[in-house]
Amino acid sequence: MKKSILVVDDEESIRNSLRGVLKDEGYNVLLACDGEEAIEKAEKDKPNLVLLDIWMPGIDGIEVLKKLKAMFPRLGVIMISGHGTVETAVTATKLGAYDFIEKPLSLDKVVLTIEHALNLQQLEDENEILRQKIHKKYEIIGNSEAITRLTEQITIAAPTNGWILIGGENGTGKELVARSIHRKSLRADNPFVEVNCAAIPEELIESELFGYEKGAFTGAVSQKKGKFDMANGGTIFLDEIADMGLKTQAKILRILQEQEFERVGGTRRIHIDVRVIAATNRDLRKEIELGNFREDLYYRLNVIPLEVPSLRDRKVDIPLLVLHFLKEFSAENGLEEKEISNEALEMFTEYAWPGNIRELKNVIERLVIMTRARVIRKEDIPVPINREPETGEKNCLFDTDSLKAARDGFEKQFIEEKLRGFGDNVSKTAQAIGIERSHLHRKIKSLGIEVTR
Ligand SMILES: Nc1ncnc2c1ncn2[C@@H]1O[C@H](COP(=O)(O)OP(=O)(O)OP(=O)(O)O)[C@@H](O)[C@H]1O
Ligand SMILES: [Mg+2]
C-alpha cells in the first residue's frame, strides 16, 4: 500500500515542487497551506508522515507539531524552515519531531529523510506488534472468582520483592503466573531465568546453578556463568522444586540465605540480587513429613504462597479458554478462525481435565489443525472428552471371558486417558499413576498405545 505524506507549507511553490517529487517517489501526497488545514487533514486522512513548515501565518509549525503529537504520538513529523535556528530545531526534536530540514530544500535530502523516518516508524510498529504478541502470550485468561482472586494477589505481590511459592496441579499455569509476576515487577527489564529442578542431575546442579571457573575440571576451558549469575537483578524461577534431592536442597538453601555463592573451582564470593519464585505440583507439607523436603527451605521459600486453581474448580472459565485457544491456534496456523458448536463446547465444560489448561490447549490445537470444517462439532471431539463413544468402548470390556483381556482393555483405556491428560508426557503420567517411567514405556508398547511425542 502506498504511504501517504502530508506536506504543510504556506508557499505554494514549495507545496507543488514537493508534491511532484514525492509522487514520483511513489507516495500519496496530501497538501495543506496552514496549521489549521494540516490538523484537519491529519485527523481525516491519517497520513503516515508529515512535512511541516515552521514559520506560517496563523498557528505556527511548533504549535501544530504539539497538537499532532498529542493526537498521534507515533506519527513521524519532519520540520522544514527557512528561518531555522539551532534552538528551533532542538525545540522541535524535544517535542518529538523526527528531523529538521532547512530551506532552500535539497530534494534529495528530503526524500532520504522521509525514507529513514518511515523505516524507523515501521520498526517501531513491528516492535509494538511483537510486544503485544508477547503480552498476549502471557495473558492469564479467565474471569472466575478463583482466577480473579489469583490475579489480584499477583497484582499486589508483583511489585514487591517478596519471594513467592506457587502451588497447583500439573498444567494449571504455574509458570505463566511466575512470568506474569516478573513482568509486573520492578525487575521486569532484567532477566527471568527458569531452572527446571527436576531436569538437572544431582551431580550437575552446582555447575548449572553457580557456573564454573576456567580450569575447574577437565573440559572447563572457559568460565561459565550459572543460572544465579544470569538472573542477577531479575527473577529466578525454581520450577518443580520438590524434585530436587536433599543434597541439592541444602546447597540451594545456603545460597538463598546468603545471596552469595562461589563458582565451581573458584574462590571469589559472588554477591547476587535475585528474587526467587518457586513452583511445585506436590504437597510440600506431605513431602516434609515423608522426609523428602527440607522444612527450613520450605519456610525460606514460602513467604507469599499462591495457589493456582485447577480447571475443575473454575469450570466457568472453560468456554473463555476454548475460544481464546481457537483464535490463537487458528491464527498461528494461518487458518480461518474456527468455531465450536454448543454441544461440543458443553463436552468441554463437563470433562474433568486432569491435565488442566495444558491438556485443554493441546486438545484445541489438535482440533484446529485436524478438523477440516470451520465449525468443530461434537463428533470431532476425541475421547475421553467425548463421553459417548467411551461408554460403548467400556462395555466392550465385558465382551470377553478372559480376565487378562479385560484387564488389558481397561489398562489401555486408563493409560490412554491419563497420557492425554498430560499431553502425552510419559514421565509426568508415570509419576501421576505411580509407576516407573520405564514400566509405563513397556505398557505403551505392549498395549499398542499411540503417543504423539
Ligand atoms: N489462565 C490461562 N490463560 C491462558 N493460558 C494459560 C492459562 N493458564 C495456563 N495457560 C497455558 O497453559 C499451558 C500450561 O501452563 P504452565 O506451563 O504455566 O503450567 P504449569 O502449572 O507450570 O504446568 P506443569 O506443572 O506441568 O509444569 C501454557 O501453555 C500456558 O500458557
Ligand atoms: Mg511448569
Image (cartoon, rainbow, N blue to C red):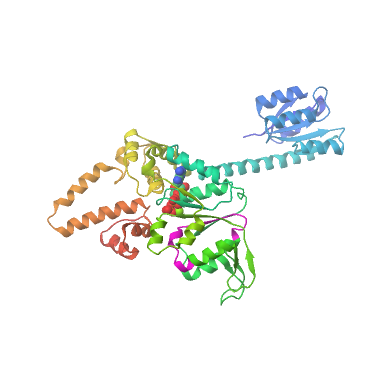
Residue at the far left in the pictured view: 401
- Asked whether 237 falls inside the magenta stretch, the response is yes
In the image, 393 versus 13, the foreground residue is 393
Identify the residue shown where x is 18% and y is 55%: 406
Q: Can residue 429 be seen in this view?
A: yes
Left or right placement of residue 204 versus residue 233 in this view = left
Any part of residue 106 in sight: no
**x and y, in percent, of residue 126 in the image:** 61, 43
Q: Which residue lies furthest to the bottom in this view?
A: 218
Residue 396 or 317: which is nearer the viewer? 317
- Give left or right: position of 64 versus 424: right
Q: How many labels does the image show?
A: 0
Left or right of 152, for residue 27: right
Report x, y in % for residue 71. Answer: 68, 29
Query: Can you tell which quarter of the image residue 317 is in?
Result: top left
The range drawn in magenta is: 230-248
Give residue 412's position: percent from left, percent from top: 25, 55
**In the rendered view of the protein, which quadrant contains the C terminus?**
bottom left
Q: Which residue is at a point 79% across and 30% down the rendered structure image?
A: 62
Q: Quadrant of residue 42?
A: top right
Nearer to us in this view, 215 or 9: 215
Q: Quadrant of the N terminus?
A: top right
Give the camera-side residue of 33 and 407: 407
Above or below for 368 versus 59? below
> Which residue corresponds to the image point at 52% horizontal and 63% vertical from the top-left?
253
Taking the spot 75% from the left edge, 41% from the top edge, the residue there is 112
Against 129, is 288 above or below?
below
The answer to whether residue 367 is magenta is no
